[in-house]
Image: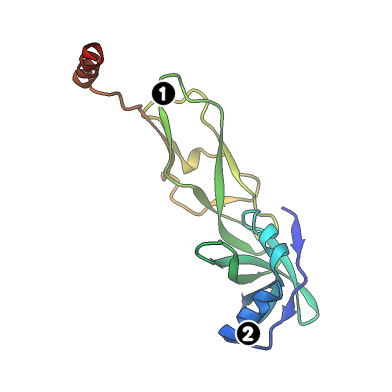
Amino acid sequence: MSEIRLAAETRTEFGKGAARRARRAGFVPGVVYGHGHAPVHLNLPGHDLMMALKTPNALLVVPIDGKDEYVLPKAVQREAIKRTIEHVDLLLVKRGEKVTVEVPVHTEGELAAGGNLLEHVLQALPVEAEATHLPEAVTVSIEGLEAGASVHAKDIVLPANVSLAVDADAVVLQVIAAQAAPVEEEAEEAAEGAEA
């Protein structure tokens, strides 16, 4: 995963009024914490941050005290209606450090014929990986799976140096049989159609 550089400014004003002023100027208030350091309050460029967060587990590089630091988004608060970013919590990470993140699960292939449905029991798979080499997603083949089949966490092929951070037997995907209308209801509908 590539790193995304963001120009950030240290925040000196705090409170709701200061946060509103920052948002009006196109910034998003944020805080960086971790590794036992005192929290650092930043204003981040709103549009650049929004674009960066479209990538799951984006590795961001922000200047802190004149030095570029790696951070991962930990919590993102969004406005309820417009979904604009209101505030972001960032976790300070170091090169080589292992972190636990949730990686989206993508599927490829087609289920066996018969109108079966695929249920995503886990939308994202918890994994442990090096902070500077986080996978963007994992892909699972569902080709030919029949009703009743399940894909467990242990069945998913992970990239090198990535390990599961969830029970290996946890169900990630399962195939559900299509629900057919009862035969009696179909007969009644056919009879009603004939009368009309």
Residue contact at pointers 1 and 2, CB within 8 angstroms: no
What is the C-alpha distance between the residues marked 1 and 2? Answer: 55 Å
Looking at the picture, tell me which residue is in the foreground, 152 or 185.
Answer: 185
Give the vertical position of 49 relative to 21 (above or below).
above
Q: Which residue is mark 1?
A: 115
Looking at the picture, tell me which residue is in the foreground, 122 or 95.
Answer: 122
Which residue is drawn at the image coordinates 19% and 18% (left, top)?
188
Across and down, in percent, residue 140 comes to: 55, 36
Q: Amino acid at mark 2?
A: Ala
Give the vertical position of 172 relative to 12 (above or below).
above
Which residue is drawn at the image coordinates 21% and 21% (left, top)?
185
Across and down, in percent, residue 133 comes to: 69, 55
Residue 97 visible in the shown view = yes
Residue 38 visible in the shown view = no
Which residue is drawn at the image coordinates 74% and 74% (left, top)?
8
At mark 1, the secondary structure is: loop
Residue that sits furthest to the front in the current view: 196
